[in-house]
Amino acid sequence: MKTIQITDRAVIDDIIDRCPYCMLGLTDGEGLPYVLPMNFAREGDHVYLHSGNEGKKVELLEAEPVACLTFCDGAELVWMHREMACSYSMKSRSVIVRGKVSAITDPDEKRRALMLLMRHFTREELRMSDVAVRGVRVWRVEAAEITARSFGNRPSEL
């Protein structure tokens, strides 16, 4: 089974856009990883996240405003030889985005980002109260590095 690097930006964006959530990776003050699932929206080289106004991820992002986001689509068990365990693999595609994180504080920009988040999940026309907008944090991850891979490809699929 082969792993293939994906460089076509349209394919990378498609992988991200198909994902219902991403995994947000942060580092605490002791150098230990902290990873959690997050809802998101993508627009160009920016990924938007939202959270409550306090908690561990808020503390970590304020202390060290960098993040690693992982997106993965598909999960198909494939094999080269059905009876050989070592020939099995999980066929999938993944994207890793690394970048700087900033909090969005402007109410209009915050509302726009929150609407992008909602559009990732539904095309319904939605309203958002000022109280609701003030009640959450919105984060923008500006991609500094984007890498993508396709895993579990059989030689015949290359």
Image (cartoon, rainbow, N blue to C red):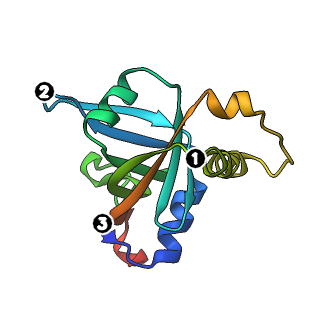
* Quadrant placement of the N terminus: bottom left
- Name the residue type under label 3: Thr
x and y, in percent, of residue 105 in the image: 53, 43
Give the number of the disc on residue 30: 2
Residue 113 in the image: state x and y as whole percent: 62, 50
Quickly name the residue at label 1: 106
Q: Earlier in the sequence, mark 2 or mark 1?
A: 2
Taking the view exactly as shown, the residue that stands out farthest to the left is 30
Percent x, y of residue 53: 50, 25
Disc number placed over residue 3 in the picture, else none: 3
Q: Is disc 3 placed on a helix, strand or loop?
A: strand
Q: Specify the label residue 138 is tagged with.
A: none
Q: Residues within 10 Å of mark 2 (few under 14, many from 20)?
A: few
Label 2 vs label 3, nearer the camera: 2
Q: What kind of residue is marked 1? A: Asp
Residue at image point 67% right, 49% down: 108
* Distance Cα–Cα, label 3 vs label 1: 42 Å
Looking at the image, is mark 2 or mark 1 nearer the viewer? 1
Query: Secondary structure beneath disc 2?
Result: loop
Residue drawn at x 49%, y 54% as measured from the top left? 47
Is residue 145 depicted above or below 49 in this figure?
Answer: below
Residue 123: x and y in percent read 81, 52
Mark 1 closeness class: few <14, some 14–19, many ≥20 residues within 10 Å: few
Q: Quadrant of residue 33?
A: top left
**Residue 128 vertical position relative to residue 16 in the rendered view, above or below:** above
Q: First in sequence, mark 2 or 3: give its number.
A: 3
Q: CA distance from mark 2 to mark 1?
A: 32 Å
Residue 134 shown left or right of residue 74 in the figure: right
Residue 88 seen in render: yes
Q: Residues within 10 Å of mark 3 (few under 14, many from 20)?
A: some
